[in-house]
Amino acid sequence: MSSKPLLSFCIPSYNRLVRVRELVLSLLSRPDPDIEVIVLDNGSTDGTFDALNQITDPRFRLAANPVNKGALFNMVNVFSYASGEYVVYSTDQDCTHIDRLDEFKTFLRAYPSVSCGFCEFRVPGAGQHRVFTRGYDAISAIAYKGRHPTGYFFRNKDLRKVALNERLADFNVVDLFPLEFAFAEVCLMGDGAIYDGGLFSPNNGEDVVKHKSSTTNGASKSAFFAPAVRLKLALSYSRHAEKLALPASDSSKLGVKIFFAELGAATIGYRTVMGNERLCIHYRMTPRRIGRLEMLAVGASFTLRYFSVRFAWEPVAAIGFLGSLLSYLGHKLAGRLDHT
């Protein structure tokens, strides 16, 4: 490729030969010089590398780890092969609607202040794209969400400043969510965006049931949706957020939002996953119903553990955070009353 493309689609892959090949060929099916497609194969044993290596399109770049180095390694390193102005993350199983690609390119060119964001999965309506001012507004809207990462995008030069594969590759800290931390830092460099153009859709079909997850064992307490992991992320997100260059008031508000978001993921989110038969099969576990009492117990344990770990021997800080929590709840309640 003689000139830098606008978009680099970055796809880490492991043992998903058919799906990843379909995805790559779909992206390359348009004669579009503004894109490149990158796959970092993580030591697949199903012939993925050999099959992809037969693709001769100059817009395609294939790299490989000699052995499986883990999902986190592949996720943070795939970007290092990208040359595009923007990098776009995709798992190797989701769908990109290439007929909507021109609209996304138009959006990026129309908003040069945007440094990062994510694409909504839902079918587009009126195209209500949202742009958030750099700093607290962008971080609050974009970062620390723990979403399915397909459709995450970053300005390449800004993401490189984060040094993702050097600073955010400790599984004990970031789990499988390094891009959430990267979002927060990149949102200090430029505006954040939520793109509502229906460019991507997750794979919710039969393949989810047939193809078991290679990264998550739902029967383990280390599964990303397990309450213990959501607690770990709440603490990691909070510690990371405290170090951002934000005013104290914004930092406090951000910490409260992180707490409530992860508390919800550990309770309501966990119940939703456990009640979804397809997801349970995909994650190698038996579905079960989680009642209100169990949810309350999980929520209480989460809250007590969060306070004891984050504010150990710091009663003043704990009281200050509790005050922020109550203020946040008060504003939420007032807002609901105003709409009744």
Image (cartoon, helix red, strand yellow):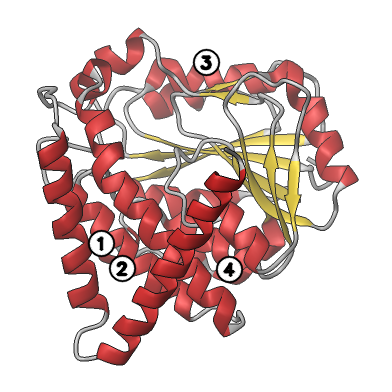
In the image, what residue type sits under mark 2?
Answer: Leu
Q: Secondary structure at mark 4?
A: helix
Label annotation for residue 235: 2
First reached walking from the N terminus: tag 4 or tag 3: 3
> Could you tell me how far apart the alpha carbons at marks 4 and 3 are, in whole angstroms?
33 Å
Disc 1 target residue: 232
Q: Are marks 2 and 1 in contact (CB under 8 Å)?
A: yes
Q: x%, y% of residue 76?
A: 45, 54
First reached walking from the N terminus: tag 4 or tag 2: 4
Q: x%, y% of residue 91?
A: 46, 33
Disc 3 target residue: 22
> Could you tell me how far apart the alpha carbons at marks 2 and 3 are, in whole angstroms?
39 Å
Left or right of 49? Residue 154 is: right
First reached walking from the N terminus: tag 1 or tag 3: 3
Left or right of 286? Residue 24 is: right
Report the mark closest to the observer, 2 or 3: 2
Label annotation for residue 185: 4
